[in-house]
Image: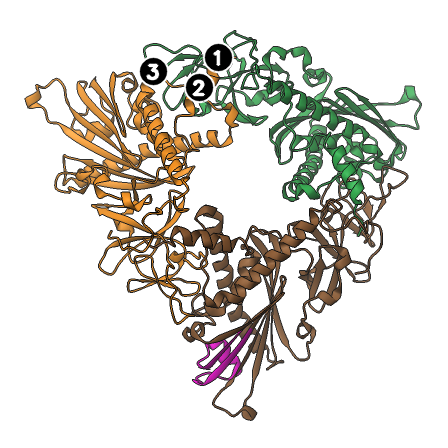
Chain colours: A green, B orange, C brown
Amino acid sequence: MTLPSSPVLQALKKSASSMANRNTPFVYNEWYVAAFAQEVSREFLPRILLGKRVMLFRTETGQAVALSDRCAHRAYPLSLGKLDGDTIVCGYHGFRFNTEGNCIEVPSSSKCPKDLGVARYKVAERGPLVWIWMGDPDQADESRLPEHEWLCDESAWATSSGYFNLQSNYVSMHENLLDLTHLSFLHAATFGTPDYARAEFRSEISQGYFALHRDVVPTTLPALWAKPTGLEGCATAARIVKSEFKSPAFHQVNVSFYDSKLAEQDRRVSRIKTAHILTPQTNSSCHYFIVHGRDFGLEDDAITGFMHENLFKAFQEDVDGMAALEQVWETTDPDDMYEISVVSDGPSVAMRRYLKQRADAEAAARALPNASVQTVSTAETPSRKAETA
Amino acid sequence: MTLPSSPVLQALKKSASSMANRNTPFVYNEWYVAAFAQEVSREFLPRILLGKRVMLFRTETGQAVALSDRCAHRAYPLSLGKLDGDTIVCGYHGFRFNTEGNCIEVPSSSKCPKDLGVARYKVAERGPLVWIWMGDPDQADESRLPEHEWLCDESAWATSSGYFNLQSNYVSMHENLLDLTHLSFLHAATFGTPDYARAEFRSEISQGYFALHRDVVPTTLPALWAKPTGLEGCATAARIVKSEFKSPAFHQVNVSFYDSKLAEQDRRVSRIKTAHILTPQTNSSCHYFIVHGRDFGLEDDAITGFMHENLFKAFQEDVDGMAALEQVWETTDPDDMYEISVVSDGPSVAMRRYLKQRADAEAAARALPNASVQTVSTAETPSRKAETA
Amino acid sequence: MTLPSSPVLQALKKSASSMANRNTPFVYNEWYVAAFAQEVSREFLPRILLGKRVMLFRTETGQAVALSDRCAHRAYPLSLGKLDGDTIVCGYHGFRFNTEGNCIEVPSSSKCPKDLGVARYKVAERGPLVWIWMGDPDQADESRLPEHEWLCDESAWATSSGYFNLQSNYVSMHENLLDLTHLSFLHAATFGTPDYARAEFRSEISQGYFALHRDVVPTTLPALWAKPTGLEGCATAARIVKSEFKSPAFHQVNVSFYDSKLAEQDRRVSRIKTAHILTPQTNSSCHYFIVHGRDFGLEDDAITGFMHENLFKAFQEDVDGMAALEQVWETTDPDDMYEISVVSDGPSVAMRRYLKQRADAEAAARALPNASVQTVSTAETPSRKAETA
């Protein structure tokens, strides 16, 4: 019987206490993706984001709006009401709200009480994504959106996208994305190859940014990559990978493929990027939006179809695997739970410490005596001022 | 972003703390409806009432009996046993009980231990309803039954009845019934009209009785009411509504319809009454019995059929709406939950305060050192004395 | 209303506090059955045992192995990985473990960290059963296996076996097995007869061994027993029963049948034995393995078929009944719960006290400052030493 010894276990538990996991509060002061732009329409879209019930819709001029999905009166879901122009009408007692979340009419009363409203969350629409800020509104600066210009640049990148309702906490999925040695195992049947896990790697670790570089050269690409890049049968392929945690909401994988036996100037380099977009739903589930892009064969729908089908098979392996892992956490006595880290976990451990620090700092700020009861406002800047999305 | 400001939220929370909601203990010292009379037979009927497992049946002479649905021995459900005359035989080890809940035989033993019994609850059968008292038996006075004579008067009232297992706490449903402004919205497709919510109202608020009066005159009735009352196409109809909370178990809606352009002596007044009968099951579900009656066209089965079909469509809207509301409470962080009340909520707020006071007073009494562990008995009057139902 | 009076209830609760029930911790320092031998193969078999995730498989030489079903790295279920010879390869990042639970390779690293491993549980295979020891490995002495030689003796006993995933705590099922008066009621349609419950009985109660003897003579056997023993229509049959709690994991029922009107030397005695094997899964479910054997008509497949079919119908009655009982415990306010014991409960009450003492003693030992965090190891004998199954 080979368990870590008791002193080792104690040390592991101490170390684990500084790393985020499924029990860590969410980090609210960040931009998260609430929905694909095409999901937001004149029909209300209810969605649980960071543990809170939100609903999204578009104004008559097409602007995306996100409100707390509950009437200010008796908490009935606003998403069960209807839109009258740009006025939201609650489906229970008919209270009416404008797009700022202000109540503007109570049918049973000739005058509308002041200060009756629901939380409105700032949104920022960029290309295919609608972002939401659910933390302190004073910090909702769009400059804090993680960089993702390629996603909005249709002239340079052909994209395809998908969505999973992932039955896993978001921390585990971020960790998955920061340790791609799992490609050789979890994805052995799709985009992994045995040499991937053993390849040299280097990492970049800084406050809020964590990256892993892995150059697999020479290698033989799996069909998924070899076919569309024209590198089928090539035993000297290069697979240059950079996997970046850009924010708690956004992870990007960047890969370049070429034939390494050609001189640099003769190479045809094919690039792909994948945005792995994670928005916590509950502590054991998240919205997992994926946008995949390539900079070659932009007009070739057959490539798009082939890659989409095969990529999402691989992503399904992550989705299934993370759900299985969540079940272990869910059903194991916390006293029996431990994790042992190895060298390749460096970036993910740093990332989990960063998330834990962020979450703890926010929790401490919320606990201050003059802090608002709601996460979403601060005592210094109460309520009524209008804010543009 | 328009949230109530932090001081407003604090005030709301303080106010909410005196109002009953889904987390408030049940009020036990009241008569509740356990079942429709026709449901109680020589087959055991198991049912969870006020959080407790109860079973009902009839004696050979037809008397309704309610016992705790668990054997005194090892807690096996008595409802899985069988009746032998008026003796209940447990289906596990064959312990036998009489209708008082006293154990009268233990098969494996020649003598039956004393003081071996299960709780018997007083019942009172009235017309179509079997009432149960689950609180202090010394207070189980039938004079405390809410008045509902019309329900038992078949000569004057034609009735139809139905049942929902409502996935909502009973407080929310009582509040629904005390604020009928929701008819214009939740029931816009059935028995609501737009003018209903805006009509003048007055309220009666006293200890344990709360009523709302609303005279909608002149109005155009929805088909549900217009058709059976002969007021179709009439633009001068009167709809005189009185909605009464008579007890934690019983709400009654009384409506009169007539043509207001006729002089009082020429009017044909059609009356309907609806008993909305709520018996908590768990903190998030209740038994919702409905009996609807009218004092016109008593023999006309077509009217009965038409009204039943359309009324229960409308009641289904409440059932669906309350379940949606319960989900908001269920999935929202209590720190994020608030309710803002307006003028028309006066009676329902008073009612919720009343329920809270009742529940708190009972809880305090239970906590007294000489109180029984069980809600259903008191230290002063222990067990054995026989009580008639 | 006949409830136990308040002082009686208080006394019952005090008494109950010394008896094991669904809330009592498991007893780990015992051999439990993990699986039927035929279930353990070269495919991983994941199973929750005593609240812990375990997986079982066989080595290339056929030896059964049980490991904690989680990788030492990030807790991914090892049962989702694969076997490479006798090496377990984790399906997530490819960590490799030997059958001792030691990590022997980390693909992303040239050297494997020391002390990286998962719990290996001792197993003991005996006939159709694979036993597991999940407590202190120093106490894992095979001499502590409950005696069950007949189970492995195919020449003397014809057996048939089955499995239920019982939705009940294991204590209730042990109690069921130690009070067979329930045969007359729960099994009235299968192997119970009315006189069974009333028959005289005597009990043996010692530390860790509890038995009930019941001689039902003369009796008429139910078809299930009468038919295969040739005692159909015999009104002078003898049914001599001994029901033995041999360990928290193992209960054995031994019955002899013969015609009592024959002199002892002329009797043909037919014997049956049934092993009721209980391994807790969660606090409200257990693995219920059953092996039934007879010492007559060994080669007669028709008897085997007849008895198997009818016996497992009867066992299904226990399974359904225990699930119903569990629901009472699950849904009843602990303050309202009580149990009253009668004379025939003597052995089961003693057994429940014994289980409670065992569980409490183990819990106290785990809480000692120098005890391991894990139940499965002790501070004095850390980790690495190899142990044979």
Q: What subunit carries mark 3?
A: A
Disc 3 with disc 1 on a shared chain: yes
Secondary element at image label 2: helix
Q: What subunit carries mark 1?
A: A
Does the magenta segment cover residue C220?
yes
Classify C203 as above or below C380. below
Crowding at label 1, few (<14), some or many (≥20) Cα neighbours within 10 Å?
few
Q: Residue at x 44, y 80 (%)?
A: C220
Query: In 3D space, how far apart are the residues under numbered discs 3 and 1 (Cα atoms)?
Result: 23 Å
- Can residue A251 be seen here? The reply is no
> Quarter-wise, where is residue B216 in the image?
top left
Q: Which residue is most to the top?
A: A385
Q: Amino acid at mark 1?
A: Glu
Q: Which residue is tagged 2?
A: B12
Q: Which residue is tagged 3?
A: A107
Residue C78 image point, x, y percent:
74, 47
> Quarter-wise, where is residue C111 in the image?
top right
The span shown in magenta is: C213-242
Residue B258 image point, x, y percent:
15, 24
For residue C45, side relative to residue B236 (left or right): right
Q: Amino acid at mark 3?
A: Pro
Classify C256 as above or below A297. below
Q: Which residue is most to the left?
A: B265
Q: Residue at x 46, y 55 (%)?
A: C12
For residue C274, side relative to residue B311 (left or right): right
Q: Which residue is tagged 1?
A: A60
Crowding at label 2, few (<14), some or many (≥20) Cα neighbours within 10 Å?
some
Taking depth in this image into account, of B334 and A166 the one nearest to the observer is B334
- Can residue A376 be seen here? The reply is yes
Q: Of circles 2 and 1, which is in front? A: 2
Disc 3 with disc 2 on a shared chain: no
